[in-house]
């Protein structure tokens, strides 16, 4: 049969009394929370198959954004962008470093 515990809690310790026995437990809890945060916030790599599937629908908007950025850049010097013709073919490139 279950009964209530007979020992009373030790209330003589202050919250600031962190002993050498409780420090490893606190460190372990902090480590677990840090690992959970890192896993939740880590950068996830985009799925190449999903990107290939979305590209045809996004292509007109991407072409317009490219033309706007290129015409506002003022490069090459002294020339004005009037139009830009994009090819029909796709050239996929995967790299671990950003393109320069």
Image (cartoon, rainbow, N blue to C red):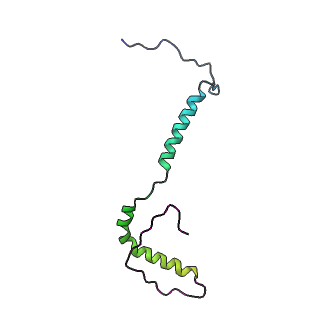
The answer to if 47 sits in the magenta stretch is: no
**Image point (43%, 83%), residue name:** 85
The answer to if 94 sits in the magenta stretch is: yes
**Image point (47%, 75%), residue name:** 65
On screen, residue 68 above or below 42: below
- The one of 91 and 59 positioned closer to us in this rendering: 91
The part of the chain drawn in magenta is: 76-100
The answer to which quarter of the image holds residue 100 is bottom right
Residue 1 rendering spot, x and y as whole percentages: 36, 11
Instruction: Count the marks.
Output: 0
**Image point (53%, 62%), residue name:** 97
Residue 55 rendering spot, x and y as whole percentages: 38, 69
11 vs 65, left or right, is right
Examine the residues drawn in magenta and state their main secondary structure. loop
The answer to which quarter of the image holds residue 34 is top right
On screen, residue 24 above or below 41: above
- The one of 51 and 62 positioned closer to us in this rendering: 51
């Amino acid at each position: 049969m279950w009964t209530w515990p007979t020992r009373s809690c030790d209330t003589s310790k202050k919250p600031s009394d962190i002993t050498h026995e409780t420090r490893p437990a606190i460190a372990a809890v902090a480590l677990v929370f840090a690992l959970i945060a890192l896993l939740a916030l880590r950068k996830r790599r985009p799925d190449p198959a999903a990107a290939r599937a979305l590209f045809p629908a996004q292509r007109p908007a991407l072409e317009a954004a490219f033309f706007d950025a290129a015409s506002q850049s003022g490069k090459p010097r002294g020339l004005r962008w009037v139009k830009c013709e994009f090819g029909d073919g796709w050239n996929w490139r995967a790299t671990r470093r950003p393109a320069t």
